[in-house]
Image (cartoon, rainbow, N blue to C red):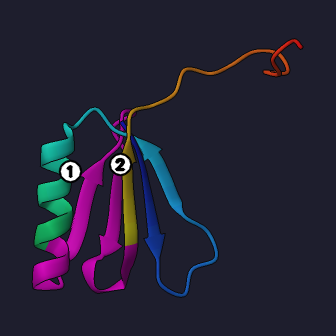
Amino acid sequence: MEVRIGVLHAPREVVFESTESVDNLQAAVDAAIASGSTLRLHDDKGRVILVPGALIAYVDIAAADARRIGFGGAAS
């Protein structure tokens, strides 16, 4: 899963790949926002991502897209 987290007052998103299920990611985000605690997630390389729950602006969880090669334009 590709995860994008917008953090208040930060110019860039936190973006990483995770092997967690959507339900587990959503439960962790909901708990951190509700309690104001730190959101703690792991990426697919074993790194730990920490984000203060009170500063989470948005979270986007989506299936990772396969990388495309070429220009991607349709022939007319």
Q: Are marks 2 and 1 in contact (CB under 8 Å)?
A: yes
Q: Is residue 17 above or below residue 27?
A: above
Callout 1: SS? helix
Instruction: Assign the N terminus to one quadrant of the image.
Output: top left
Of helix, strand and loop, which one carries label 2? strand
The circle drawn on residue 53 is none
Residue placed most toward the observer, 7 or 70: 70
Seen from the viewer's position, the closer of residues 9 and 22 is 22
**What amino acid does circle 1 point to?**
Leu
How packed mark 2 is, by other alpha carbons closer than 10 Å (few <14, some 14-19, many 20 or more), is some
Left or right: where 68 falls relative to 65: right
- In the image, is residue 23 above or below residue 30? above
Residue 68 location, x and y as percent?
68, 19
Is residue 63 located in the magenta-colored stretch of the structure? no
Q: Residue furthest right?
A: 76
User: Which residue sits at x=28%, y=32%?
Assistant: 19
Residue 61 numbered tag: 2
Residue shown at 47%/84% (left/top)?
A: 8
- The residue tagged 1 is 25
Q: Which residues are magenta?
A: 32-57
Residue 62 screen position, x and y as percent: 39, 41
The front one of 22 and 51 is 22
Give the amino acid type for the residue marked by disc 2 in the picture. Answer: Ile
Vertical position of residue 8 compared to residue 40: above or below: below
